[in-house]
Image: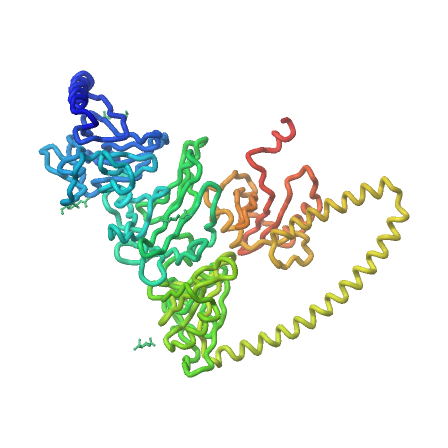
């Protein structure tokens, strides 16, 4: 069959001998041909060509049920990424995987199939072969055609609880499958659990986390760069995300561009979505990202027309122009009843839109999308339709493009300290009017104030310059050089500090203040994985800002008796002590009863290695 029949016969003969001589002989090839089989008793496996993945029978935990699965060969910690017969285990330690009637089947002790690829019909002309690829895909294909069109069946179309690089989550027109991941029942039990993560193709596609029949969390739609509900998502080193919407498919996938970097997205048996990356030095999986993260990630936390802000207390707020539907329950911090309009829409004209910034778009399952028009036409389109309640861009790249409109209620909205996008919500003229006037007044007066400030600043600057010149003339050369170097240093330090702050209120503190939310996001919500160390004063975390800057966060323990003013004084002192050989203090954070110091992050090195080489 592999070319000459003679060869084939001598092969089987040879194999037969091997099997007699070494019953535990492992095939260790990356293919399984029609004449070969995998059995529990022989303990043989199929290994992908580059030794990345391995397929075979396994027994999780202590019970006696056997499964056919795929795990990493290249990684010491046994991690299953796919299970064939998750809901139909073998009850004894007798089991066989083979190709039979153009299908892959798993047979039990009485040769009854417990699992099959269930392919029907089809004129299969040449023999089939099953192959494990280096990306973890197990394919059944024509033995003479290794091109994609020779593939009859692939495990990537039937995910278990793990999304591997190059594997697609979502809908494929050719097979009609909407591939999704579903959790294990428990860490020792691969059978189908309660939680799944599945793409909703209706409306503006987004991915939902389900607990059985109820929605728990949604990713938000893809906005050209990331999911609307995952503001911290960005192309990382070695990792590329891909969301494709076309007639042929609506899919999400990711790619790893370096061969020895391992990353996987999986859903735990307790319903947490997690991305892990393998850390070779630690011989462990590091949690890189997870969701849901906070109260505001909970689906419909603030009901209809409410939005969740994890920086406010309570977290639920009504959109401008709306008020709590049930003020009493709202006051008791249950936002799920949502909000109602203060003034009904008139439709006839005069309606307008309030612009909400840095938002996660509302549930888009029933929204409609027109990628061909921009934000101006989108506004017109929404105004023309009396049922239209909101609109936004579908793609935030550049100055934004595309149009998504909602008709009916808006729900599951939240805002972010960083990230998110503009959402325009329709309001009646009266609810807009007073706002317009007020903002006009504010703009008017702030322009006046700014002009005044600018003028006085220029005068002050000119005066200062004149003074400085006269001082410099009097100082000796050496002293002058030293001083100007110091001045330069200070300027560099200060400007680099300014750089990371937004327009924060720095009053008497030279150091920028960061918001708690910003620090929390940068440190993955103070996750244990980001912990660098711990001392009597508190815990130190590693963090990364959205712009990529790394930092070390010292979170002072809450039990510290120091007051906020003393803390600020001390920080001021440290800030003034900035020196070229000291780790630089970048910012501090006094927020939500927390006190934190944010330092520059130094890779992998401690002070002594700097001092003593
Ligand atoms: C199968 O082989 C692996 C390693 O090659 C070994 O750890 C395991 O105990 C073996 N299982 C059986 C049932 O022999
Ligand atoms: C194959 O078909 C059987 C019977 O219809 C079904 O129980 C089983 O789940 C199917 N297997 C797969 C892998 O779809
Ligand atoms: C994204 O995936 C689609 C098909 O799934 C593919 O055609 C496209 O080239 C991919 N884009 C990138 C940047 O990898
Ligand atoms: C607006 O909604 C109502 C009730 O849901 C429906 O009957 C009507 O056809 C809708 N109008 C448009 C223009 O879609």
In screen coordinates, is 561 left or right of 25?
A: right
Coordinates of residue 290 in the picture (x, y in percent): 41, 48
Depth check: 195 or 533 in front? Answer: 195
Residue sitting nearer the eye, 200 or 249: 249
405 to 589, vertically: above or below: below
Rendered position, 209 above or below 304: above
* Left or right: 578 as drawn, with respect to 184: right
Q: Position of residue 21 (x, y in %)?
A: 18, 16
Residue 410 appears in the rendering: yes
- Which residue is painted at 17% across and 19% down in the image? 10
Q: Is residue 113 above or below residue 460?
A: above
| Left or right of 309 in this view: 124 | left
Q: Which residue in the rendered view is the most extreme toward the top?
A: 21
Image label count? 0
Viewer-proximal residue among 300 and 332: 300
Q: Position of residue 2 (x, y in %)?
A: 21, 27
Chosen colour scheme: rainbow
Q: Residue furthest right?
A: 474
Residue at the image position 10 percent from the left and 34 percent from the top: 111
Q: Quadrant of residue 475?
A: top right
Quadrant showing the N terminus: top left
Q: Quadrant of residue 266?
A: top left
**Going by the picture, which residue comes out furthest to the front?**
4
Judge whether residue 322 can be spotted in this image: no
Q: Residue furthest bottom?
A: 348
Quarter occupied by the C terminus:
top right
* Residue 326 picture location, percent across and down: 38, 73
Q: Quadrant of residue 221?
A: bottom left
């Amino acid at each position: 069959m592999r070319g000459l029949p003679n060869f084939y016969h001598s092969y089987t003969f040879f194999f037969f001998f091997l099997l007699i001589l070494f019953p535990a002989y492992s095939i260790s090839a990356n293919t399984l041909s029609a004449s070969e089989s995998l059995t529990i008793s022989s303990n043989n496996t199929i290994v992908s060509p580059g030794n990345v993945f391995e397929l075979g029978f396994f027994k999780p935990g202590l019970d006696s049920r056997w499964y056919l699965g795929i795990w990493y060969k290249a990684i010491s910690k046994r991690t299953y990424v796919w299970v064939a017969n998750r809901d139909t285990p073998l009850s004894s330690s007798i089991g066989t995987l083979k190709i039979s009637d153009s299908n892959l089947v798993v047979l039990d002790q009485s040769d009854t199939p417990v699992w099959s690829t269930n392919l029907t019909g089809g004129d299969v002309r040449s023999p089939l072969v099953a192959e494990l690829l280096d990306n973890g895909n197990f394919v059944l294909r024509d033995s003479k055609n290794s091109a994609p069109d020779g593939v009859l069946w692939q495990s990537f179309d039937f995910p278990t609880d793990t999304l591997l690089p190059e594997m697609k989550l979502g809908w494929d027109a050719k097979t009609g499958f909407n591939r999704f991941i579903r959790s294990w029942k428990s860490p020792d039990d691969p059978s189908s659990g309660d939680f799944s993560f599945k793409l909703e193709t209706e409306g503006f596609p987004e991915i939902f986390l389900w607990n059985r029949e109820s929605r728990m969390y949604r990713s938000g739609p893809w906005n050209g760069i990331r999911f609307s509900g995952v503001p911290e998502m960005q192309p990382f080193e070695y990792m590329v995300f891909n969301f494709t919407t076309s007639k042929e498919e609506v899919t999400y996938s990711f790619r790893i561009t370096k061969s020895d970097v391992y990353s996987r997205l999986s859903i735990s048996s307790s319903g947490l979505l997690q991305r892990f990356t393998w850390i070779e030095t630690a011989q462990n999986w590091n949690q890189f990202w997870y969701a849901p993260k906070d109260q505001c990630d909970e689906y419909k936390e603030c009901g209809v027309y409410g939005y969740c802000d994890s920086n406010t207390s309570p977290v639920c707020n009504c959109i401008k122009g709306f008020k709590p539907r049930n003020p009493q329950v709202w006051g008791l911090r249950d936002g799920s009843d949502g909000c109602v309009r203060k003034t009904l829409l008139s439709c006839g004209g005069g309606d307008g839109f309030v612009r909400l910034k840095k938002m996660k778009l509302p549930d888009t399952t029933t929204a409609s999308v027109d990628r061909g028009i921009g934000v101006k036409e989108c506004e017109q389109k929404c105004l023309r339709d009396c049922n239209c309640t909101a609109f936004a861009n579908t793609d935030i790249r550049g100055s934004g493009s595309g149009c998504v409109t909602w008709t009916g209620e808006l729900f599951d909205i939240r805002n972010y300290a960083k990230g998110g996008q503009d959402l325009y919500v329709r309001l009646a003229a009266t609810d807009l009017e007073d706002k317009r006037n007020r903002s006009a007044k504010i703009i008017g007066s702030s322009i006046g104030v700014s002009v005044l400030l600018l003028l006085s600043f220029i005068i002050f600057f000119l005066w200062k310059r004149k003074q400085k010149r006269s001082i410099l003339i009097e100082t000796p050369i050496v002293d002058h050089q030293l001083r100007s170097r110091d001045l330069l240093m200070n300027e560099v330090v200060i400007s680099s500090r300014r750089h990371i702050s937004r327009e924060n209120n720095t009053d008497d503190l030279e150091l920028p203040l960061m918001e708690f939310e910003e620090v929390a996001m940068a440190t993955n919500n103070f996750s244990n994985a980001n912990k660098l160390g711990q001392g009597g004063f508190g815990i130190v975390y590693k963090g990364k800002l959205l712009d990529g800057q790394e930092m070390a966060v010292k979170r002072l323990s809450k039990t510290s008796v120091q007051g906020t003013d003393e803390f600020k004084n001390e920080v001021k002192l440290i800030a003034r002590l900035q020196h070229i050989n000291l780790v630089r203090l970048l910012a501090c954070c006094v927020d939500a009863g927390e006190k934190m110091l944010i330092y520059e992050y130094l890779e992998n090195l401690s002070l002594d290695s700097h001092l003593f080489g």
